[in-house]
Amino acid sequence: MGIVAAAVRLIVFLLAASLYNLGVSVFFLLYNLHLLDLGYQESFLGLMTGIQTAGSICGTLPAGWFGSRFGLRAALGVTFLGGALVSVARAAATGQTVLLVLAFLGGIALAGWAVSVAPTISQLVPEAARPRAFSVLMALGIGMGALAGLAGGRLPQWTSRLLAGLGDPKQLALWAGAAVVASALLPLAALRLERAPATPPQRPPVPSLDPFLRRYLLAALPWNLFVGAFPSFFNVYFSRLYGAETSQVGLVFAGAQAAQVAAVLLAPWLFARLGLARGIPVTQVGAAAMLVALAAAPGTGAGMLPAAVAYAGYLSCQWMSDPGWLSLLMNRTAPERRSGGSAWNFFVVFSTHAVAATAFGAAVTRLGYARPLLAVSLLGLLSAGVFRKSLGETASEIAAETSAR
């Protein structure tokens, strides 16, 4: 009976997580296209993405405190409700200042989800089954992204037919996505989570930077600048250069999600065959090459399919590299230092993403897409060289130790 009850609780949480991911993915797919209709340029979209990421950075520690103080169920409830309300407001707002403030609040809501997921899974699932539970959660998240691409791309058409005359179709579709986010509260209401025992408040120490972690973060810096530059602009890119309709942008998004599933499944095989020292640079060079192909695709209707394939390949190589980076960090960090190492890694990832998206948006507004994409691809190639110089020897040592064991 205990096993059955635990399985039911996990299923209920996965249902809530799937609804949340579906609603957020629909919003991500359509929001920039909505702002494009309002007349905003890529420079503002990049700034807004940077502000949102800054909100995620600032919201991380408060979200952790809130979950510890009031429990994970309360933290998830605030995240779902707050995310839905902020999404409704973002779809309704038109002024620059209000949009930027709401983007910051949206980033805080996203941080609440990111901080709450791992401890919730850890409470619901015994230690031996956690890797599989996390894999299922990731697969469902990607699957919801694909569904959002297929359904979300056509959602403005459906809302314009069903709710004709009540508002702009994309705005109505964004509100529908926010409603899906709010619907995650229904299964959450049936989920029972234990509250952590109260502990005296204390100021957490700043994690130290050992020599390996310094080299790791140095190698991660150019790579995360590369990773954070283009993804938030993909919908505007296909809309501007190829005149893609919202439904076509949704298909591109869904296809890229499917490709990412394949990449995640192939990643263990790649690293087992090449090792981390060679496997990670291969994925970096692959992502850079796909971005070159994206920049070279003709900006006409006939070039949309090659561009979509290049975009899917670019994202797939990024996702394929992630397990290698995380394995390297965890394998070479002492158990008592892993939380601190993860915190520093998280800080570098989101900080660089904020800078990269802001700079890329400003560059596109002045230069168009081709030259900024080529510049970012060069950054990807540079990051492969930096990795080999900074971490290649360490990755080879890990492979040798693993073989010896």
Image (cartoon, grey):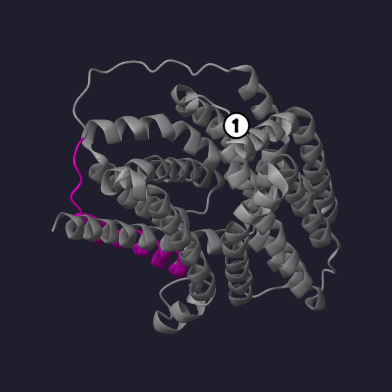
Q: Could you classify mark 1 by the number of other residues whose Cα lies within 10 Å: few (under 14), some (14-19), or many (20 or more)? A: some
Q: Nearer the viewer, residue 25 or 394?
A: 394
Where residue 149 appears, as percent x and y from the top left, is 54, 70
Where residue 332 appears, as percent x and y from the top left, is 58, 29
Viewer can see residue 40: no
Q: Which residue is mark 1?
A: 348
Residue at the (69%, 54%) spot, across then down = 317
Segment colored magenta: 172-195
Where residue 46 appears, as percent x and y from the top left, is 65, 46
Q: Is residue 20 above or below residue 155?
A: above
The quadrant of the picture occupied by the C terminus is top right
Main SS of the magenta segment? helix
Where residue 67 appears, as percent x and y from the top left, is 29, 36
Callout 1 secondary element: helix
Q: Quadrant of residue 73?
A: top left
Residue at the (36%, 64%) spot, across then down = 180
As drawn, is 387 to the left or to the right of 47?
right
Q: Nearer the viewer, residue 291 or 180?
A: 291
Q: Nearer the viewer, residue 392 or 43?
A: 392
Residue at the (66%, 58%) spot, across then down = 316
The residue lying furthest to the front in this view is 404
Q: Is residue 185 magenta?
A: yes
Q: Is residue 126 above or below residue 18?
A: above
Residue at the (52%, 42%) spot, across then down = 52
For badge 1, the amino acid type reads Val
As drawn, is 164 to the left or to the right of 201?
right
Viewer can see residue 116: yes
Q: Is residue 235 magenta?
A: no
The quadrant of the picture occupied by the N terminus is bottom left
As drawn, is 335 to the left or to the right of 382?
left
